[in-house]
Amino acid sequence: MPVLERSRIPLVALEDMNAVHYEEVDLINQIDALLTRIESGAAEADELDALLNALQDHMIEHFRSEEARMEASGFPPYPIHKGEHDRVLLELGGLIDRWKRERDTAPVSRYIRETFPIWFEQHLGTMDAVTADFLARTGA
Ligand SMILES: [Fe+2]
Ligand SMILES: [Fe+2]
């Protein structure tokens, strides 16, 4: 069972936002699969570095593009939505630093398999959904 499924995440009103969310689902599932292989000794821990960096890069770009559109359209709750993006990027940065220091898969596993999926579904269903509705209505 993948951690997240494309067919089960909350959809928003803009297809290009959904497409970015699908890419993030795929990355999370790739990391989950690699964690399973590392835990069973079938892969080296070092292989996780590149995928965690790819997730971080993807999230930075994902958030930056939503923020640019919110700013351009004058979306009033922009600071709240951006604040949530900033919080999650800090959290992920802390996790990656810890991984590089300790090489312990347990915190990464908890984050990728529990913390992130819960946050992701909740964020898509609330802040992203409201934002996409506003952008779709205002034609931004
Ligand atoms: Fe999003
Ligand atoms: Fe967002």
Image: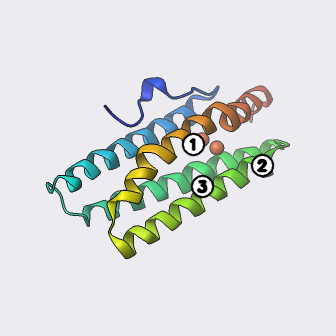
Helix, strand or loop status at disc 1: helix
Q: Is residue 71 visible?
A: no
Which residue is the site of mark 3? 88
Which mark sits nearer the N-terminus, 3 or 1? Answer: 3
Camera-side residue: 18 or 90?
90
- Provide the residue designation for mark 1: 119
- Look at the numbered discs 1 and 2 and tell me whether their residues touch, using CB distance below 8 Å: no
Quarter occupied by the C terminus: top right
Q: Is the Cβ of the residue at disc 3 closer than 8 Å to that at disc 1?
A: yes
The amino acid beneath tag 1 is: Trp
Element at badge 3? helix
Task: Residue at 33% x, 65% y: name it.
Answer: 104
User: In the image, what residue type sits under mark 2?
Assistant: Ile
Pointer 1: residues within 10 angstroms few (<14), some, or many (20+)? few
> How much space separates mark 3 and mark 1, taking CA atoms?
9 Å
**N-term-proximal mark, 3 vs 2:** 2
Q: Position of residue 108 (x, y in %)?
A: 40, 57
Q: Amino acid at mark 3?
A: Val
- Please provide percent x and percent y for residue 95: 47, 63
The percent coordinates of residue 71 (x first, y second) are 78, 49
Q: Are there few (<14), some (14-19), or many (20+) residues within 10 Å of tag 2?
A: few
For mark 2, what is the residue? 80
Please determine whether, in this image, residue 136 is positioned above or below residue 67: above
- Give me the residue at 56% from left, 56% from top: 60
Give percent across and percent down for residue 14: 62, 29
